[in-house]
Amino acid sequence: MAKSRFQLQQGSILVATSNFDNSPLVRSVIILTGHDEDGSRGILINKPLDRGNISDLIPACDKKLDQRLYCGGWEYCDQMFSLHKLGDRTLRSATKVTDGIYTSIDKSELERMIHSGNVQRGTFRIFKGLCTWEKGLLEEEMYEGSWIVKKVTQNFLSKVFKPECDASIWSDYANSDDFMIENISRMLMKTTAKN
């Protein structure tokens, strides 16, 4: 099987291939927030929830900051996660995912941040749920050709917190030449392996 040019690591971007076309993960983009000997964790970044805004979770949220909530994954759906570019100086509980992107799970700290007036729209997203894989499962899905691993780019960083990125971020990666070559290579290898 053709290997992705990038190895799995915290901060990697997973881009769903056509293996997920008949699944809720169709056209999904996930950022890995952790990848170690215990397994992998990540946040699905481009699937807004059908209903729900930040003001539903954080009362008295400034209307300028109110935005949709996102489905972060299929585990821990009752827990709130955030991705932001505020850093650990603004939020003590922030954990660096990669250069320019942090995650936080402390709801009270997020509430203080939103009420402080020191944060702007387009610098954070709030998610319900998290994607998780047991040890070796994500690698197995990659071997089956379900994901292509990409690096965080400046284009990604400039778009990830904007609402209009929901529809375009998967297309941005999927329309790149290297994505199409990797996807075709994986499909050919899969077909060859079956014969």
Image (spheres, helix red, strand yellow):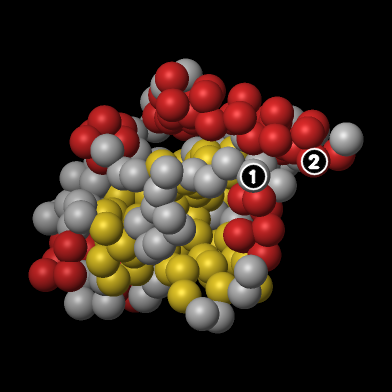
Q: Position of residue 117 (x, y in %)?
A: 15, 55
Q: Residue at x 17, y 63 (%)?
A: 87
Residue closer to the observer: 22 or 37: 37
Q: Which mark is residue 30?
A: none
Q: Position of residue 188 (x, y in %)?
A: 70, 28
Q: Residue at x 64, y 35 (%)?
A: 186
Residue 133 picture quarter:
bottom right
Which quadrant of the figure contains the N terminus? top right
Given the current orientation, which residue lies at the most extreme bottom position? 38
Mark 2 crowdedness (10 Å alpha carbons): few <14, some 14-19, many ≥20: few
Q: Residue at x 28, y 71 (%)?
A: 95
Residue closer to the observer: 103 or 147: 147
Measure how far apart labels 2 and 1 are at the Cα level.
9 Å
The residue type indicated by label 1 comes to Met
Q: Residue at x 42, y 21 (%)?
A: 176
The tag earlier along the polypeptide, 2 or 1, is: 1
Residue closer to the observer: 5 or 25: 5
Q: Position of residue 105 (x, y in %)?
A: 40, 71
Counting labels gives 2
Q: Which mark is residue 1?
A: 1
Residue 169, visible in the rendered structure: yes
Which quadrant of the figure contains the C terminus? top right
Q: Position of residue 70 (x, y in %)?
A: 52, 47
Q: Which residue is mark 2?
A: 193
Q: Is residue 164 above or below residue 30?
A: above
Local SS, label 1 = loop
Residues under numbered marks 2 and 1 in contact, where contact means CB atoms less than 8 Å apart: yes
Residue 25 picture quarter:
top right
